[in-house]
Image (cartoon, grey):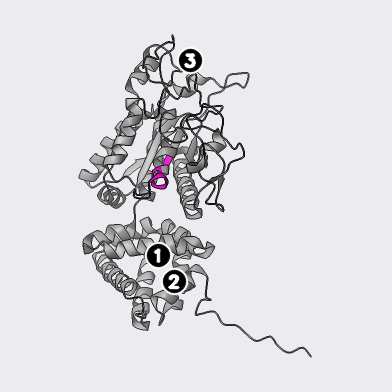
Amino acid sequence: MNPEAIAELALELVAAYFGGEGISFGGKAWSATDVKTILESFDIWMLPCANPDGREFVMTVDHLWRKNRRDNPGTTCDGVDVNRNCDFMWGVITSQTSCSPCTLTYLGPGRFSEPEARNIKDFCDTHSVELFLDVHSFSELVLFPWGHAPTQTTNPSQNFLSLATGTCAPLNPSGHMEFLRPNDLQRFQSDAQRVVDDIRAVRGRNYTPKSIHALNPNTGTSTDYVYSRHISNAALGKTFAYAFETGPPVLNSNGTVNEPESFHPADPTRIIQDTKAGIVSLMQRSVCAVEFMSATLETTSGLDKMRAVRDEQLAKTEAGRELIALFDRVQFELLGLVLADESLTKEAMDLLEVSINLLEQRDTVLSTREAERGLAFVDSLASRTTSKELLIDLDTIRKQLKASADMSFAKIVDQLVGTTEPAVAKKTKPRPKK
């Protein structure tokens, strides 16, 4: 059902864009402005089916097949699990990854031995990929790295680069916990939760966000490989990678899972609606409002410096990460409000230039006049929404902006990351005891 969902969504997005219309799935809708923003923010590549001969075999011979149909020399067993064949912890076996050609999770004779897996590598080698999604079924899950080990965020030296691979042996050491940067984990968790919320709005289905390992330990998956590339090679850009497990398990009368019905429901229409909503939700979460506006200014240096401040300063403290999360939470909705009003769009562009100048001339002070201009802009945005959550976040932004008046960029950043107290905070002297 997932190849059909992806193909349908491609057509529906194009029709909505050129028709100047929104798109909806059950109780979840995106406006025409939302669709326009998503499709004009980045290129979207959709591959409805990554394993065509395997899918044909599923449709005609064995409804529980998961491998491709390659011949395994020296055996009577065919096929390699394409989603165990990528060069990430390849050759490390788990309960869900096998070196035996006769199992359904056979990892193959070598890293990227299969053309289906090499297609993923080749695409990532030749394109700048910011977001990757692998769509599977079933279980109603939104998954993210890691799959080979539990995640930890405190010890960078514990990472996959030091682990033995290609051994057809279990993970060594067995208690290894893989490092994940705190801000990346925050991004994965917040994105997954937003997708879960948007899927629930379609018809009430409750998907669960979790790491791949929390579902079951495995290696060689496309999701882990695509995300890990920037760690294996620091010259590569970072790609946030996810996987969906779409559709619920169908139970037999005795409470066991009916796998054929779970993988191939007689009527997948409603599940396809959930899937399409989840995909659009993840696309929406990947739009960067600042990047979208900066494209009009035709400047990249300021944007690169903003990213550096985010990743090298804000992301390293809890207070800074909370600010990043707030911005991620509000940016798409605010961008829609801005683009719907020409005067707001012009003001947003002017304020973005002010921000870039402040960033590039770090000793320059944010004047009271500029701060008041920013506050007026926030008030204009607040007057155009009825969302209680967004109004709360805008109030937080308003308070921070007030506290930043007459401060240099460096001091503003120190305040944001929590190394100095907000300028609006005032300490009162304790009263003497009687």
Which residue sits at x=53%, y=50%? 157
The total of numbered circles placed on residues is 3
Most foreground residue, 359 or 26: 359
Q: What stretch is highlighted in magenta?
A: 229-242
Pointers 1 and 2 in contact (C-beta within 8 Å): yes
Measured along the vertical axis of the image, is residue 229 above or below residue 425? above
Mark 1 to mark 3: distance in Å?
51 Å
Tell me which corner region of the image, top left, top right, bottom left or bottom right, holds residue 226.
top left
Q: Hey, what amino acid is under mark 1?
A: Val
Pointer 1: residues within 10 angstroms few (<14), some, or many (20+)? some
Q: Position of residue 419 (x, y in %)?
A: 52, 72
Q: Which residue is farthest top? A: 76
Q: Is residue 359 left or right of residue 166?
A: left
Residue ID for mark 1: 309
What number is the disc on residue 51?
Answer: none
Q: Hey, what amino acid is under mark 2?
A: Val
Q: Is residue 183 left or right of residue 289?
A: right
Q: Which residue is farthest right? A: 434
Which residue sits at x=31%, y=62%? 303
Assign a secondary structure to mark 3: loop
Q: Is residue 234 magenta?
A: yes
Q: Does the magenta stretch include residue 287?
A: no
Q: Where is residue 373 in the image (x, y as percent from the top left)?
A: 34, 77
Residue ID for mark 2: 413
Residue ID for mark 3: 102
**Residue 50 seen in the figure:** no
**Residue 150 seen in the figure:** yes
